[in-house]
Amino acid sequence: MKMTIDMPFVETCTVSGCGYNKDEKCHARAITIGDGVHPGCDTSFLGAPGHTHENNLAGVGACKVMGCSFNSDLECGADNIAVSMKGDSVQCMTYHAR
Ligand code: SF4
Ligand code: SF4
């Protein structure tokens, strides 16, 4: 059985060292963002060999960053997000402080 869930897409991710990344797209089914304060990608798997089901583009399953203006009830309300390295951490670049 498959579930169809309406989620924001991870439109781009430039973190080429993550096992879910291919050609600047995330191929996890869904990712989780945030540790409660910082909008890091909790799903990142740096240095891992590729897991890339090509047809599968990731959605944002959950986000724990309540301080982001797109966050509602611990879910992301943006149409899509972009993920990239910021300093030495992987972050949601769509984050916007309330
Ligand atoms: S969004 Fe996260 S899990 Fe997906 S490719 Fe980028 S770093 Fe990896
Ligand atoms: S845009 Fe905001 S609410 Fe959406 S995933 Fe990024 S930090 Fe979370």
Image (spheres, rainbow, N blue to C red):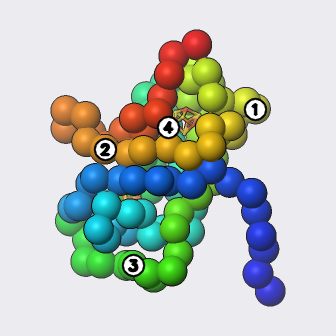
Quadrant hosting ligand 2: top right
N-terminal-most mark, 1 or 3:
3
Q: Residue at x 76, y 81 (%)?
A: 2
Residue 70: quarter of image = top right
- Tell us which disc is closer to us: 3 or 4: 3
Q: Which mark is residue 52?
A: 3
Q: Is residue 16 left or right of residue 3?
A: left
Which part of the image, by quadrant, shows the C terminus? top right
Q: Residue at x 42, y 38 (%)?
A: 92
**Secondary element at tag 3:** loop
Q: CA distance from mark 2 to mark 4?
A: 14 Å
Percent across and percent down for residue 45 are 33, 61
Other residues around mark 4 within 10 Å, as few (<14) / some (14–19) / many (≥20):
some
User: Disc 2 vs disc 3: Cβ atoms closer than 8 Å?
Assistant: no
Q: Taking 97 as reference, is 39 above or below it?
A: below
**Count of numbered circles on the image:** 4
User: Is the CB of mark 4 within 8 Å of ligand 2?
Assistant: yes
Q: Which mark is residue 73?
A: 1
N-terminal-most mark, 3 or 4:
4
Q: Taking 72 as reference, is 85 above or below it?
A: below
Other residues around mark 3 within 10 Å, as few (<14) / some (14–19) / many (≥20):
some
N-terminal-most mark, 2 or 4:
4
User: Disc 3 vs disc 4: Cβ atoms closer than 8 Å?
Assistant: no
